[in-house]
Amino acid sequence: MSSKILLLTLGTLLANLLPAQFGKIVLPTPAFNNALEKIVVDYRYNFTNLKGETVVKQGEYDTYSSTVILPGASNCIIYGSHSVEDTSASWQGIFYKGDDYKQA
């Protein structure tokens, strides 16, 4: 009987402690949230407000540096079309560049 109570007590303690520690690891920082919010809000404008200097011009697409960079990203860029028919754009943040899946 006492071993069941001890096991129940330990299980309850672990259940209460683990989610708090897990949440600290997974939740992003406020700086990350703020930057991501700016990117998501500007999506409807094809990231026009986030376009920095032109990095590459090739064909119908241009590549721009992003003025908003997510914390932890090594590079953030915007691909934009300057076609009359296709005015779409995409935003890309690179967090890891390599071939090693385990290291990523």
Image: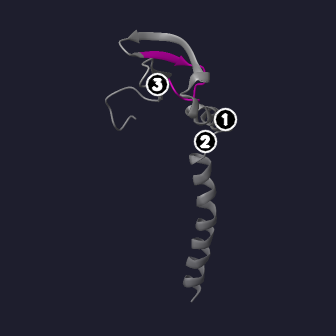
Q: Nearer the viewer, mark 3 or mark 2?
A: 3
The residue carrying mark 3 is 87
- Give the residue drawn at x 59%, y 66%: 14
Q: Mark 1 Cα within 10 Å, few/some/many (few <14, many 20+)?
A: few
Rendered position, 9 above or below 19: below
Rendered position, 40 above or below 54: below
Q: Nearer the viewer, mark 1 or mark 2?
A: 1
Q: Earlier in the sequence, mark 3 or mark 1?
A: 1
Percent position (x, y) of residue 62?
Answer: 44, 15
Tell me the chief SS of the magenta region: loop
What amino acid is at disc 1?
A: Asn
The residue carrying mark 2 is 28
Q: Quadrant of residue 57?
A: top left
Residue contact between numbered discs 1 and 2, judged by CB atoms under 8 Å: no
- Give the residue drawn at x 49%, y 21%: 77
Mark seen at residue 34: 1
Percent position (x, y) of residue 86?
Answer: 42, 25
Rendered position, 50 above or below 40: above
Q: Earlier in the sequence, mark 3 or mark 2?
A: 2
What amino acid is at disc 2?
A: Pro
Rendered position, 92 above or below 6: above
Q: CA distance from mark 1 to mark 2?
A: 10 Å
- Give the residue drawn at x 57%, y 53%: 22
Q: Is residue 38 magenta?
A: no
Q: Which region shows up in magenta?
A: 62-74
Secondary structure beneath dot 1 equals helix
What amino acid is at disc 3?
A: Thr
